[in-house]
């Protein structure tokens, strides 16, 4: 229950990423939150949100400072291109508001550290990873935390979609034209584009959540895709840990189907191997499969039902802040930084075509 005297005032700044529409919908549907304002330098990019949520003209801005000074929000959602995350955080952080960054954390570890350093006391930096809110993965984490499979030794991840331009907010299907691809930041190296930066952080960050925050000693990455593009569409990363175990993280733009409509093959999600059992947790599936010493033949069990406010990022974040709690798990800068460090190593490995130390 909201303990505040007034609704949470939330603003959305920069519409580079289509997930802004999903996050604004969560805000719109939250009983104690209001879309207090939206801001983007290009007014046309806000038209869909204005129509969807009946946002009045006096809450629509093209200048960040005017938006922040006029609205004085409690929480700011930032959906800028990956390479501009640090720039936006450094610009908005001095206002002292909680900042909610849509994944990935940043385009580099240096940028992630700039973001953390820009925060002021009492202000929380939140990095949202949508896979965190899939019941299958939340159930997997609960079972790991309860010790069902012992100590996590390996995390194997495969994920992606048909491509970042094949869908918009609310997963509305869109036609991908060569012109759209040429103009999109997703396909520009300078803007932090590419399947590796788009999806690898999911696997490495949730992987760190699953394995108790362990980091590998070295990383080997290979990238592929259309050679005419300046960014990758496919990456495979192998992490080697101090105990000799290996984990694999694979990202793909161009899966046969999107996992939220029909699971492609290979399935998108995680296979987690522990000292006493295994878990197969796939995106958006209603069940997960487990193996234990007691049932080595395996069994399929239903996923937990995630209930408000633990079912989605905006309700979760507001609940944590209202109750004076730090953001935890994959959304925390501490866990997300482990994921980002691995991503940085992967980028360097792919560039040098060699194994690199973390």
Image (cartoon, rainbow, N blue to C red):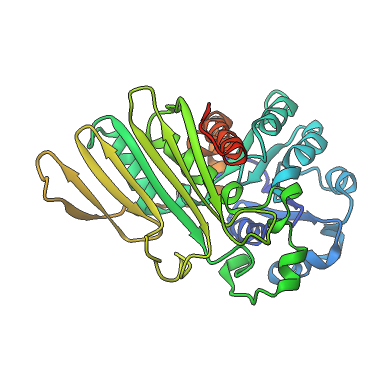
Q: Residue 268's x, y, as percent?
A: 41, 57
Is there any visible trace of residue 314 in the rendered image?
A: no
- Tell me which corner region of the image, top left, top right, bottom left or bottom right, holds residue 114: top right
Residue occupying the point 85% across, 61% down: 42
Of 331 and 211, nearer the camera is 211
Residue occupying the point 9% across, 41% down: 294
Of 269 and 91, nearer the camera is 269
Up-down relation of residue 136 to residue 93 (above or below): below
Is there any visible trace of residue 71 in the rendered image?
A: yes
Residue occupying the point 46% across, 70% down: 257
Q: Residue 54's x, y, as percent?
A: 74, 69
- Tell me which corner region of the image, top left, top right, bottom left or bottom right, holds residue 60: bottom right
Image-based side of 11 in relation to 282, left or right: right
Of 134 and 228, nearer the camera is 228
- Label total for image: 0
Q: Residue 79's x, y, as percent?
A: 70, 51
Q: Residue 119's x, y, as percent?
A: 72, 28
Up-down relation of residue 4 to residue 165 (above or below): above
Image-based side of 350 in relation to 213, left or right: right
Of 130 and 223, nearer the camera is 223
């Amino acid at each position: 229950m909201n303990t505040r005297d007034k609704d949470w005032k939330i603003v959305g700044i920069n519409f580079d990423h289509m997930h802004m529409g999903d996050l604004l919908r969560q805000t719109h549907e939250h009983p104690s939150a209001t879309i207090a304002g939206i801001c983007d330098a290009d007014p046309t990019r806000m038209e869909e949100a204005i129509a969807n949520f009946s946002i009045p003209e006096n809450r629509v801005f093209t200048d960040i400072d005017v938006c922040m000074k006029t609205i004085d929000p409690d929480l700011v959602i930032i959906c800028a291109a990956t390479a501009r995350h640090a720039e936006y955080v450094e610009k908005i952080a001095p206002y002292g508001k909680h900042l909610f960054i849509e994944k990935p954390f940043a385009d580099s570890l240096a940028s992630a550290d700039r973001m953390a350093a820009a925060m002021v006391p009492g202000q929380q930096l939140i990095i949202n990873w949508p896979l965190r809110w899939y019941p299958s993965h939340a159930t997997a984490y609960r079972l790991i935390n309860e010790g069902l499979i012992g100590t996590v030794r390996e995390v194997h991840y495969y994920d992606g979609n048909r491509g970042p331009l094949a869908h918009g907010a609310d997963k509305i299907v869109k036609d991908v034209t060569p012109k759209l691809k040429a103009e999109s930041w997703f396909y520009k190296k300078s803007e932090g584009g590419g399947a590796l930066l788009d999806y690898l952080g999911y696997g490495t960050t949730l992987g760190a959540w699953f394995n108790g925050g362990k980091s590998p000693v070295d990383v080997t990455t290979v990238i592929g895709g259309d050679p005419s593009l300046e960014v990758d569409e496919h990456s495979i990363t192998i992490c080697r840990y101090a105990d000799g175990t290996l984990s694999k993280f694979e990202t793909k733009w161009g899966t046969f189907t999107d996992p939220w409509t029909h699971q492609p093959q290979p399935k998108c999600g995680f296979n987690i191997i522990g000292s006493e059992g295994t878990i197969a947790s796939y995106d958006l599936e209603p069940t997960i499969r487990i193996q234990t010493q007691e049932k080595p033949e395996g069994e399929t069990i239903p996923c937990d039902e995630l209930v408000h406010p633990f079912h989605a990022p905006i309700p979760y974040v507001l609940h944590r802040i209202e109750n004076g709690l730090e953001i935890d798990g994959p959304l925390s800068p501490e866990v997300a930084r482990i994921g980002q460090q691995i991503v940085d190593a992967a980028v360097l490995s792919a560039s040098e075509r060699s194994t690199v130390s973390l």
